[in-house]
Amino acid sequence: MSTKTKNKNNKDEGKRDFLVVSTYAMAGIGAASFAWPLIDQMNPAADTLALASTEIDLSSLEEGQAITVKWRGKPVFVRHRTAEEIKNAQEASIDDMRDPEKDSDRVTNEKYIVLVGVCTHLGCVPLGQKSGDVKGQYGGWFCPCHGSHYDHSGRIRKGPAPTNLAVPSYEFLSDTLIKIG
Amino acid sequence: MSKAKFKNPVVKWIDHRLPIFSFMDHELNHYPTPKNLNYFWNFGSLAGIALVTMIITGIVLSMNYTAHVDYAFDSVERIMRDVNHGWLIRYIHMNGASFFFIVVYIHIFRGLYYGSYKAPRELLWILGVLILLLMMATAFMGYVLPWGQMSFWGATVITNLFSAIPLVGESIVTWLWGGFSVDNSTLNRFFSLHFVLPFVIVGVVILHLVALHRFGSNNPIGIDVKGTQDTLPFNPYYTIKDLFGLGVFLTIFAAAVFFFPNFMGHPDNYIEANPMVTPAHIVPEWYFLPFYAILRAIPDKLGGVLFMFGSIAVLFVIPWLDRSSVRSSQFRPIFKIFFWILLADCVLLGYLGAMPAEGIYVILSRIATAYYFFHFLILFPLLPYIEKTKPLPISISEPVLSGSSPASAFAFREKK
């Protein structure tokens, strides 16, 4: 075989490799772009995302009482805290908390604590909204599923939950009317 | 391969073009099987029959089921009350899941006791663990379909396990739900997947059988088949043994279906799902309890999830963790003791999974979880260095304790 043909062969091989690699690359991109709609269809649909916000009238909520409303398929807790509960929540030392957060950062009006009523561990609804409920060692909420204790500010104090109960985005439309979402 | 002779001209004609009859003759009729198999070898075929039962009853149930949050619960109650024989079909399906797991767990512990996962059957074992995983996913999604309280909250807790993944966890959970909580989208996709996954299981079962037939079954003494003197044709010897076992199995199964169909279920699942109220005690189905106990034993969310999935993941690598070349526990005196400890440990974990996560139960869960991982990760690799195994028999037809020499094995063969 002459040097010339050998070089020609090498050149052909290089060309063939290029064609093979680019074919695989294009096929890969094609497969991925076709797979994406199939995967993304499982994400929340437009109507689910457009779920209306919820308004809550707090005028009939007496001190020490709590109500639960449904927002985005989840319970939202609103508790009208007593002076003692507010004091407990504000004075608790945040240094040794798992998810340190000041009470003042978690409320708009310190009388009302508004929380997503879903345990941050594995999603159960904690007890503590009804008068007869077990409220846990810190007097806030207690999740019966795996034993997480939350305080008057909905902060995790004991048990497996990694973070505090979430505070939804909400605003006061008047002194006793809030809009969640 | 010996050419099968078929008398029927139609069979002959077909077999010449599509050798399906030769294949069945080879794999189900003449298929050489160790002659010393005990009744623990029945559970593979029982698992296959359980799978077929589930698929048949499941297809029929789906004809009467409505996968919508407003109708699902009622459609199941309609199956129970109004659909002809609906109660029977649903109870078979419901209890069938439990019995499927009973049979499969016995099958797995059989494999662990007799070292069936060892070379050259590693892939056979891995395919089996894969089937177990698929079964768990299928069973979990099936349990959600009746849309009772346990369905809903079980789905919530289990899907929330993925939120433990750092950074992307929350997005994954939203993706799994198709919303911001377990809702109609979740129910729809679970129904779709619950329908299709059993057929995926059938596919993996076929691979499992192909891998099995490559080297044939392991056997109670765990040594290789040396020749035809060690085997029997599958039919009629093991077809009849399997059928007898099936009769016993069906008797117990029927007793459950007809006399205590709700024994293994939870009364809370006859209350329609309510996203606002979590039942006081959320407990998964019994077959998930040991894994649930491991999840709760770890006082950290991500840690618990990792240990729970790890408890199944470790099963995949058992063939390489166990360094002993002796398969059967019959010749491994120390291994045998630890086998029973492992079995007791798994039963204890199952019990603890059903108990509330507090006090002594948490401590015991931690000890039992530690033992589970100790058994596979430390004991399996180290034991062969300490343990003195008993002498292995020369062959299946001639156990070593009979006092005969290899020559007499030959004589035995001649006599036959």
Image (cartoon, coloured by chain):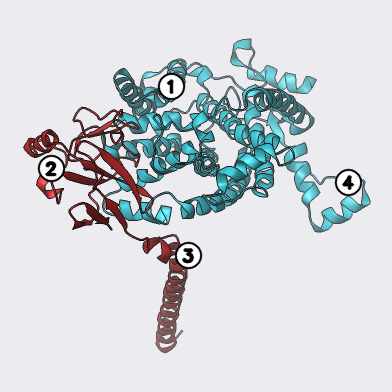
Chain colours: A red, B cyan
| Residue holding disc 2 | A100
The 10 Å Cα crowd at callout 1, few under 14, some 14 to 19, many 20 or more, is some
Mark 4 falls within which chain? B
In the image, residue A42 above or below residue B410: below
Q: Is residue B208 above or below residue B289?
A: below
Q: Quadrant of residue A153?
A: top left
Q: Residues within 10 Å of mark 3 (few under 14, many from 20)?
A: few
Query: Picture coordinates of residue B335 (x, y %)?
Result: 44, 20
Identity of the residue drawn at 61% across and 31% down:
B95
* Local crowd size for mark 4, using a 10 Å CA cut-off: few (<14), some (14–19), many (≥20): few
Mark 4 and mark 1: Cα distance apart in space: 55 Å
Q: In the figure, residue B334 lies in which quadrant?
A: top left
Instruction: Determine the chain carrying the residue at label 1.
Output: B
How far, Cα to Cα, is label 3 from label 4?
A: 49 Å
Query: Residue A28, position in %: x, y?
Result: 44, 70
Tag in front: 2 or 4: 2
Residue B248 shows in this picture? yes
* Placement of the C terminus of chain B among the 4 image quadrants: top right
Q: Amino acid at mark 3?
A: Leu
Q: Which residue is mark 3?
A: A38
**Element carrying mark 1:** helix
Q: Residues within 10 Å of mark 2 (few under 14, many from 20)?
A: some
Q: What label sits on residue B351 in the rendered view?
A: 1
- Pointer 4 residue: B6
Q: Going from the N terminus, do you reach mark 3 or mark 2 first? A: 3
Q: CA distance from mark 2 to mark 4?
A: 80 Å
In front of the other: A170 or B97: A170
Please report, as a chain letter, where disc 3 is located.
A
Looking at this view, is A88 or A96 the one in front?
Answer: A88
Question: Do the residues indicated by labels 4 and 1 lie within the same chain of the protein?
Answer: yes
Residue type at mark 4? Answer: Phe
